[in-house]
Each structure stands twice: as C-alpha cells, then as structure tokens.
Image (tube, rainbow, N blue to C red):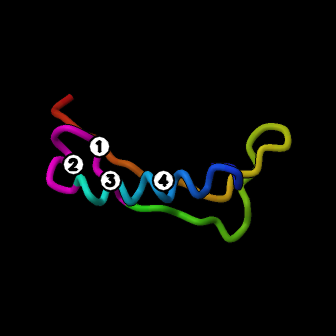
Amino acid sequence: SVPAFEAKLQHEGLVYRHLDEVQGELIPVYLGNIFFIHPYFFEVRVRIVHMLVMSWAGEQ
C-alpha cells in the first residue's frame, strides 16, 4: 500500500489473525505483512511501502 494506507493494512492483518480458525476455508490465509526497505514504484508517483500477503482459500 501507499504510505497513507499503511495503518489500515496493519489493522486488517490484526483482523485476519483473529479469524485464524476459518482461514483457508471461508477466507484467504493471511501470511503476513511486508514492509519494504526500499519503496516499490508503481506507475507514475505511486510509492508502495507495505504489502499484506494472502494465500488461496477454498477448493477452486
């Protein structure tokens, strides 16, 4: 995410941790948060500094 939304993604990670029992069945598996040492630049002037990593859920 961009710096302005970093706190929201950190909070989303906390929510996924509380839903641990249903991960992989009802919701995707939360793998963690990544904080980039060096920003990743996406398109023009979009600086990505944080990423929430998810895995697949369900059978298909």
Instruction: Judge by depth and name the residue closer to the eye, 20 or 35.
Output: 20
Who comes first in sequence, dot 2 or dot 3? 3
Task: State the CA–CA distance, disc 2 to disc 4.
Answer: 15 Å
| Residue sitting at x 70%, y 51% | 4
| Residue sitting at x 85%, y 43% | 45
Task: State the CA–CA distance, disc 2 to disc 3.
Answer: 8 Å
Q: On the image, numbered disc 2 is attached to which residue?
A: 23
- Secondary structure type for disc 1: loop
| Residue sitting at x 53%, y 63% | 34
Q: Amino acid at mark 1?
A: Pro
Asked if residue 5 is positioned above or below residue 35 in the image, the reply reads above
Q: Amino acid at mark 3?
A: Tyr
Whether residue 1 sits left or right of residue 52 in the image: it is: right
Q: Is residue 22 found inside the magenta-colored segment of the image?
A: yes
Marks 2 & 1, CB-CB < 8 Å contact: yes
Q: Amino acid at mark 4?
A: Leu
Res 16 label: 3
Q: On the image, numbered disc 4 is attached to which residue?
A: 52
Asked if residue 37 is positioned above or below residue 49 in the image, the reply reads below
Q: On the image, numbered disc 1 is attached to which residue?
A: 28
Q: Amino acid at mark 2?
A: Gln
Instruction: Judge by depth and name the residue closer to the eye, 29 or 10.
Output: 10
Instruction: Give the magenta part as a residue range.
Output: 20-31
Say which quarter of the image contains residue 20.
bottom left
